[in-house]
Amino acid sequence: MTDSLSIPLTALVDGVEIPSYAYPGDAGMDLRSIESLEIKPFERTLVSTGIAIAIPEGYAGFVQPRSGLAIKQGVTVLNTPGLIDSHYRGELKVALINLDPNNVFQVKPGDRIAQLVIQKVEQVVWNVVSSLNETERGKGGFGSSGVA
């Protein structure tokens, strides 16, 4: 059995579907749309979920794309991962973008549009130093480890 975290949730509209896990042990809960809209090719929009949550301090919510929408429809979360800070109490909305060059994407109420992952986050206190320790990678940046 895994630990669980109780998070208060308010349904902002009647009949809204509460985020849920598709399978036991999943990391992400499905977020669903409460509205009908269409997203034209290369268009971006905010999609309402009809819920507000109270994430406890020391945790954050991360809105992630659904892999099936991304590969099959070309629809993804624009600011992935979308960050929900612990002090935010407004409606959760998902910034979607349609990257398909030809097809309009239809969103209907109840459609699963993204995933929400709740994670523990640490507060950082910077320790300013004159130099950093050496590593095998060093200052090697993008592509420094090769392709194969």
Image (cartoon, grey):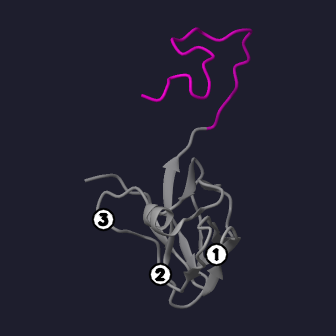
Which of discs 1 and 2 lies nearer the camera? The answer is: 1
Separation (CA) of disc 1 from disc 3: 24 Å
In the rendered view, tell whether residue 84 sits above or below residue 58: below
Q: Which residue is mark 2?
A: 17
Q: Which residues are magenta?
A: 123-148
**Residue shown at the point (60%, 86%) measured from the top left:** 35
Q: Earlier in the sequence, mark 1 or mark 2?
A: 2
**Residue in view at x 59 percent, y 53 percent:** 81
Magenta stretch holds residue 122:
no
Of all residues shown, which one is farthest toward the bottom?
14
Q: Compared to 128, does 61 lie above or below?
A: below
What is the spatial separation of the Cα atoms under label 3 and label 2, in whole angstroms?
A: 16 Å
First-in-chain label (1 vs 3): 3
Task: Give the residue at mark 3.
Answer: 23
In what element is the residue under mark 2? Answer: loop
- Residue at the location (59% across, 62% down)? 77
Real-space Cα separation, disc 1 to disc 2, in angstroms: 14 Å
Residue extending furthest toward the left: 1
